[in-house]
Image (spheres, rainbow, N blue to C red):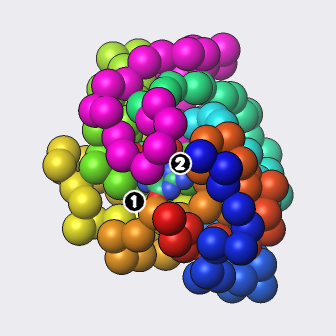
Amino acid sequence: MNPSRDRIVPMLSEEQLQARIRELGIQIAADYAGKDVVVVGLLNGVYPFFADLTRAIELDFDIGFMQVSSYHGGTESTGEVKIVKDLDSAIQGRHCLVVEDIVDTGTTLFKVRNLLLDREPLSLKVCTLLDKPSRRKTQVPVDYIGFTIEDRFVVGYGLDLDGKFRNLPYVGIYQP
Ligand code: 5GP
């Protein structure tokens, strides 16, 4: 397969994304004011959202990254979740906010959540840029949602198709 930009139909513009991220940042800052927080990004897809969101949260906090893999090419999940890179920061007794690019079946988040809860954070909340609730197979709480979207395969702003399109500043639907 040779993914092409011509097949991407724009869905969320750079302006729409940034405006919503500013709102999320204000809400998260209000909720976590005065608390010891570690904001954990799930690589790779979260990288642009994480950079923009963390800069929109006007608080002082620690950051860390984890990488898990669930997709092995193509547009369908295999259901397997593998830890590729674990978190460096300790979260025991601290407030932990996990940041995701998209929650689809919920499998990835469910596994990551359980893994982090075992480390006894004071609290654990989740923020996702995109949510596809109609695809959920595993129920998992999501506390902050940027946009709820239909069951479409989207790319851009961190989301890839076979490693491509992560660097687009907008989100679009990929038409195979
Ligand atoms: P879940 O475990 O919730 O099914 O899937 C989570 C992961 O699957 C996301 O972090 C993302 O990497 C990938 N994913 C799910 N839906 C999409 C999509 O529409 N587009 C892209 N590019 N990746 C997706």
Instruction: Decide whether residue 78 is among the magenta residues.
Output: yes
Residue 22 percent location from the top left of the image? 72, 75
Locate residue 46 relative to residue 18 in the image: left or right: left
Q: Is residue 109 above or below residue 140?
A: above
Residue type at mark 1? Answer: Asp
- Location of residue 21 by image quarter: bottom right
> Circle 1 is placed at which residue position?
143
Q: Residue at x 47, y 44 (%)?
A: 74
User: Which residue reaches farthest front?
Assistant: 1
Q: Nearer the viewer, residue 66 or 54?
A: 66
- Main SS of the magenta part reads loop
Q: Residue at x 65, y 18 (%)?
A: 89
Q: Earlier in the sequence, mark 1 or mark 2?
A: 2
> Circle 2 is placed at which residue position?
100
Q: Where does the magenta region start and end?
A: 71-98
Number of residues whose C-alpha sits closer than 10 Å to that of mark 1, classed few (under 14), some (14–19) or many (20 or more) = few
Count of residue discs: 2
Tag 1 secondary structure: loop
Residue type at mark 2? Answer: Glu
Residue 29 percent location from the top left of the image? 65, 62
Locate residue 68 relative to residue 4 in the image: left or right: left
Marking on residue 108: none
Of the two numbered discs 1 and 2 in the rendering, the one whose residue sits closer to the viewer: 2
Locate residue 51 relative to residue 80 in the image: left or right: right
Instruction: Decide whether residue 36 is among the magenta residues.
Output: no
